[in-house]
Structure formats: structure tokens, C-alpha cells
Image: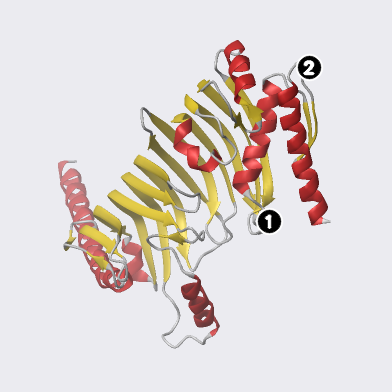
Amino acid sequence: MKKWLILIGILVVLLIGGYFVLTFYAVKLIQPRLQTVMGPGFTLEEIKLKTTYLSARGIQYEDPRSKQRFFQAEEIRIYPSILSLLKNSLHIKEFTVLRPSFFFYRSREGHLVGPWVTTKEESEGEEISKGEPKKRGEAVEVQIDRIRIQKGSVDFEDKKVGDPPSQIKLRELDFEIGDIRYPLASFHSPVELNGKMEGKTQEGSITLKGWIDAKTMDMETSLKIRAIEIKTFEPYYRKRVTAEIESGSLDMDSRIAVKEKRLDAPGELDLINLHIKEGGGTVLWIPAKTLVSLLEKKGHQIKAKFHVKGNVENPQFNLQETFLIQVAVSFAQALGIPVKVIGEEVLQGTLKGEKGLVEELKSMERLFKKKREKKR
């Protein structure tokens, strides 16, 4: 019995040692590939081969033309599979990015700029290259079991909404997506995101969970937002809000589905501690004076439902405007203002004793009638 135990112990040591040796050489194969795909603008301080993974530290990306820094990370860890040694493919068990910082912005013309964002010229170049015969042999297949981002941050500046631009700041982001393959294959990759959004006076939370098809970009996800300051989104609603929103936070629950470029996103907003400054102006077509008195009756808390649908590639589909219209109508209904809605057309609005509000809703109706006539 004692001899059997000694033999088993020796076999275990050999197996563990063999695994580490094979993994070491598998990692060694990844190092030159990483340096190749980094391209211009990417720099790193050091690459080290650990026992089971490749470690790249001090990574950053700076746009070669503008010299603006769009990405930096404390460390990237790549854990390869030893099976990659036995076939013509690269299998990565885990790709982890520790404490990364991303910066994106949208120009006044609506162009998104940031790390890994493909420009129109680059996209056209890729399409041409796809049509050319392969001169360097078949592309190596890449399979990544899991991509993880830990303690990341994202800064997004939106200049298209006007001055001052919108500033969205996400912090403490933990992101995970599984089953990624190249060449891209069409199947459901599980995705999960948890993080916080900075505001001027408080910090809210964001949670997203579901799946995404990396090839078609179809998805089904559930989104939860908690305790986000309403004024954080002021640049997006200020054209429809001429009164001043003094304070308030929002919770939101939504199911977001995209299939064949068509968006279907039902959900509900819960506006909490909402205070409007008394005086002139309107909030989503509702006079501020009327809204203040109605909110007091509701304890400064109100819920509004929405259901946004549309083709995301249709130039006439305006996600921001569609969302605000649906929230406005639901907002009015929740306050006791009956408004009949078919699609995006406000057909009727009445409230006894509030002539100003009736006129505002009627002007909303006329606005959509004009849009409908133009489409004809």
C-alpha cells in the first residue's frame, strides 16, 4: 500500500510539472503575436513570461496624429491553453485587463473617436482586403474562452449634443464576455457588466447581463440603472426642457433586444426626489408651473414607461428623440393627464382647468402631424 501511494505521488508531481512546462512554451508563442497586432500608437513597458500566463504591463495607446491618449492599462494577462500546441489554432483560456482606462468622444458631426474605433477609410480598406486572394496562407483561428476587464473606467465626451458637451464617467467597471472566436462565428456569447456612474453630488450603479452575437451584433440583455443623477443627462434633454430641473435621480429597468439591426427596448423609469424650479419654461412640453404642483401631490416621485422600437441603421430613426417622446407621454399620463398615443403621434391631450397644458399638448400634436405629412 505504501509503495502505491509513493507511485501515485510521483505521477502527480510529473503531471503538474509537465503542465507548467507545456503552458510556459504555449505562452512563449503568444508573445510575438501580441507585439505584431499592437501596431502604431501602442506602447508597453514590459512583457514577462510567468509560469502560466503572459504579462504585459504599462500598456497605453496614443493616437499617432492627434497625440491624444485613448487607452492605458496597468496590466494585461493572457492565459493560453496547452492544446494550442497540438493544432493550428490559438486557444486562450482567459484574457484579463487590469485597471484599464478608456477615452472616447463623439465629434460635432457624429463621428465616434477612440481606441479600436474603425474609421470609414479603414472599413473600406478592410472590405477591399477581404475581396483579395489570401497571399499569406489561411488565417490562424483564435478562440478566447473569457475576456475580463477588472476595475476599469470609461470617459465619454459627446460634442454632438452642443455646448457644453455631455460628460459620461463610468468607474469601477467589471466586464466579462465569453466564447469569442476569430474568424467571427455567429453564436450567443454571455456578457455581464457592473459599474458605477459619477454624478455631481452622488454616484449611481449600472448592471447589464445577457448575451451578444459578435458577428451579427444581435443581442438580448437586461439593463438596470440605480440612483443616477438626472442632471447627468441634461445635454440630451435640454432642447426639450426649458425649465430648470433642480434635483432628482432615476432608476431604470429595461430589456434591450437587437435582431437584424432592429431595436426593441421596453422599460420603465422611476424618477425620485424630482424638483423643478418654479417659474417659466416647460419640461417635456409640460409647463413647469403645472408640473411643480402635480409633483408635490405625487411626493416628487413618478414612474414613466417606454417602449422604443426602430431600425438602428435607418437615418430617420432618432433614438434620443423617440425615447424622450415616449417618456413625455407616459410622464403626462402618470401625472393624471390623459394622452392617447398611437406610435409616435400624440392625437389628443386634455386637462380641465389647465389651459396652458392643453395648448402645449396640442402643439405637440401639430408637430407630429407636420412630420407625418412630410413623410407622405
Which secondary structure, mark 2?
loop
Q: Which mark is residue 189?
A: none
Amino acid at pointer 1? Gln
Q: Position of residue 137 (x, y in %)?
A: 43, 84
Report whether 93 appears left or right of 53: right
**Residue 343 visible in this rendered orientation of the protein:** no
Look at 80% across and 49% down and name the residue there.
372
Closer to the camera, 237 or 344?
A: 237
Which secondary structure, mark 1?
loop
Q: Residues within 10 Å of mark 2 (few under 14, many from 20)?
A: few
**Marks 2 and 1 close (CB-CB < 8 Å):** no
**Residue 240 visible in this rendered orientation of the protein:** yes
Q: Position of residue 275 (x, y in %)?
A: 51, 21
Determine whether 187 is above or below 211 in the image: below
Determine whether 88 is above or below 12 in the image: below
Q: Position of residue 4 (x, y in %)?
A: 20, 46
Quadrant in the picture for the C terminus: bottom right
Report whether 61 appears left or right of 231: left
- Of labels 2 and 1, earlier in sequence is 1
Q: Residues within 10 Å of mark 1 (few under 14, many from 20)?
A: few
Q: Which mark is residue 352?
A: 2
Look at 54% across and 51% down and name the residue there.
212
Q: How many marks?
A: 2
Amino acid at pointer 2? Lys
Quadrant in the picture for the N terminus: top left
Quadrant assignment, res 281? top right
Look at 64% across and 56% down and name the residue there.
261
Q: Which residue is mark 1?
A: 316
Look at 69% across and 26% down and name the residue there.
332
Determine whether 245 is above or below 117 in the image: above
Structural distance between the alpha carbons of marks 2 and 1? 36 Å
Report whether 315 appears left or right of 191: right
